[in-house]
Amino acid sequence: MPDEQGHRSTPDGQIAHDPTGLELAQTVARSLGAQARRKRRKPPRPVGPQVSGARADDRDPKPLSDAVERLVESKGWTTEINVHTLLARWGLLVGAANAAHSAPEGYADTVLTVRADSSAWATQLRHLAPQLVAMLNEQLGDGTITRIKVLGPDAPSWKKGPRSVRDGQGPRDTYG
């Protein structure tokens, strides 16, 4: 007669050997069946804040643009980025002719620096500067740009050779 584990024992209490291996196969089958029944049971469904429903919550994926926007706001880069975005359209701001002969170089401490390729174009942009400041502040917010600094072209160095004049200014040309 088999015990609770399915083994047959002899009259003296020892486990009898089954040469066919049938008892071993039945024991393994019972064990696997019990494991399968345990796996079939569904785990309890979490309740409360762990469940994501049909509505959006903090655990849902976010668009990359939202993450970048939060980063820009937290670092205080909003004004700087807005200024550079607007200056990327320099030709629309100053006109095609002015844009062909000038380019914005930088923005720092509410001052926009513009480089012109000759002193004549630099003078032209200096005359346009108050209107540009007003237009840029209208689009970016009042006080974002207080002044436009217009620079002429980079002048070459005229100090060549050992006999150059220390305070000499060299030949004159349109170097703003």
Image (cartoon, rainbow, N blue to C red):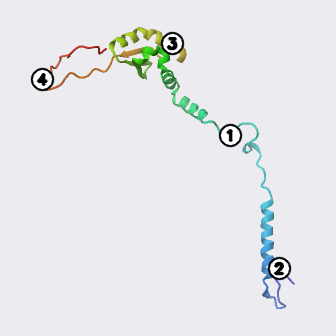
Q: Disc 2 or 3, which lies upstream in sequence?
A: 2
In the picture, the disc for residue 6 is 2
Looking at the image, do the residues carrying marks 2 and 3 touch, with CB atoms under 8 Å apart?
no
In the orientation shown, which residue stands out farthest toward the bottom? 12
In the picture, the disc for residue 135 is 3
User: Which mark is in front, 3 or 1?
Assistant: 3
Q: Nearer the viewer, residue 19 or 52?
A: 19
Badge 4: how crowded within 10 Å, few (<14), some, or many (20+)? Answer: few
Number of labels in the image equals 4
Tag 4: residue type?
A: Arg
The residue wearing badge 1 is 60
Looking at the image, do the residues carrying marks 3 and 1 touch, with CB atoms under 8 Å apart?
no
Residue 117 position, x and y percent, is 35, 18
Tag 2: residue type?
A: Gly
Q: Secondary structure at mark 3?
A: helix
Which of the 4 image quadrants contains residue 115? top left
The residue wearing badge 4 is 163
User: Which mark is in front, 2 or 4?
Assistant: 4
Q: CA distance from mark 1 to mark 4?
A: 73 Å
Q: Secondary structure at mark 4?
A: loop
Q: CA distance from mark 3 to mark 1?
A: 41 Å
* Position of residue 66 in the picture relative to residue 51 (left or right): left
Tag 3: residue type?
A: Met
Q: Secondary structure at mark 1?
A: loop
* Position of residue 48 in the picture relative to residue 111 (left or right): right
Q: Secondary structure at mark 2?
A: loop
